[in-house]
Image (cartoon, grey):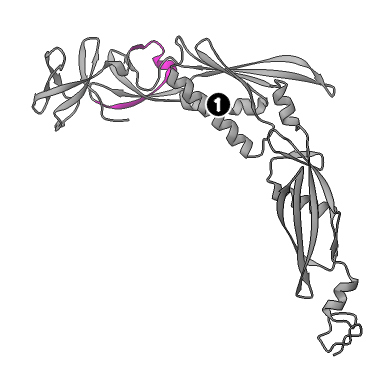
Amino acid sequence: MFCVECGKETPIFREGVCLNCYLKTHTLSNGPDSVDLPVCPHCNSFKYKNNWTSDIFGEVIRRVIKNTFKISKELKKVDINTTCQEVKDGMNCKVYISGFINDVEFTDEHDLLVKLKRIVCDVCSKKFGGYHEAIIQIRADNRKLSEKELNNILKEVEHLVENLRSKGNRALFITDIEEEHGGLNFFISDKGSGIVIVKKIQDLYGGTIKQSSKNIGMKDGKQLYRMTYLVRIFSYKKGDFIKFKDDFYKVNSIVGKKIKLTNLDNWEKTTEELKDIANSKIIGNENQIKEMIVISQNEKEIQIMNQESYEIKIIVKPKKMTIKSEKIKIVVLDDQYFIYPNIP
């Protein structure tokens, strides 16, 4: 058949004209030559429809195109793609809008200048202003947190905040961190996330949680409160040695309100409620572990020698075992000698 416009003998697409002639008089998509896109210079968040988002530029600009470009309803299975190059104060983009009409694929190409307007976002404004809804205080009972504990807790809280942010809570941030009274203070922007964090710390390190609130004013007719969460970690910690009911134990772990122990006499494991061992006594830590030389052994006992004093001791084995190494770790507690349990 012949196209009524160009006269060529070619397949007719619609209205008596070929595909090329049809596209000369029909626009499948059109839009502006430039758009403004606010971006935060501190966190690189973008503002779209009065809301700030941490999504990447490509995702945001596709939404902008869908909102600002007119796309023909004839075009089905629409797909939008962009290639962008950074220029002064913005991005120079090629916009490709493709789709199908009667199973024939079409692609429109547009030039679009995205003008990046640098504006401090809502979250960064709060952060720089010292905004916080909660204070998380982490302390140890009757002792200071060790340097290792301080570092581990700091990393854990920062990891928890980043994890919650990655799940959509971009308004969550740590305003400030203080080391005080042998513990740590975290100033957190979101009090709801604060309780999630303190419960996780309790699960990891054990201890109790106390919370209090302070009225800090009103907003939109509602009272505003700042929460303080105190996590008091028990005095016991992993690796300590304690005396409980006249027996000696190694602390393997503390989870929530439970403590996992190993009896040094027989290496039997046990789990106790922390409240039930409140009156037990911490009698040592890893400093009580000594490496000594194996002299001899039989089924029930092992003879060892102190490498420094050359003192020889005989220790009852905690269970039936054969020591194959020339040296062995020994725990000395209240002048009593125990083979260090080879368990985590």
* Above-or-below relation of 57 to 144: below
Q: Image height check: is 211 above or below 101?
A: above
In this orientation, which residue lies closer to the viewer: 211 or 10?
10
* Chain part drawn in magenta: 267-283
Q: Residue 164 placed where, x, y %?
A: 61, 35
- Residue found at x 85% / y 22%: 221
Judged from this view, the residue extending furthest toward the front is 88
Residue 312 x %, y %? 11, 15
Q: Is residue 274 magenta?
A: yes
| Tag 1 residue | 199
Say which residue appears at 11% left-offset and 14% top-offset. 310
Report whether 178 appears left or right of 283: right
Quarter-wise, where is residue 329 in the image? top left
Q: Is residue 145 above or below residue 108?
A: above
Tell me the residue at 45%/21% (across/down). 149
Q: Is residue 149 left or right of residue 87?
A: left
| Total tally of numbered discs in the picture | 1
Which amino acid, by three-letter code, is at mark 1?
A: Lys
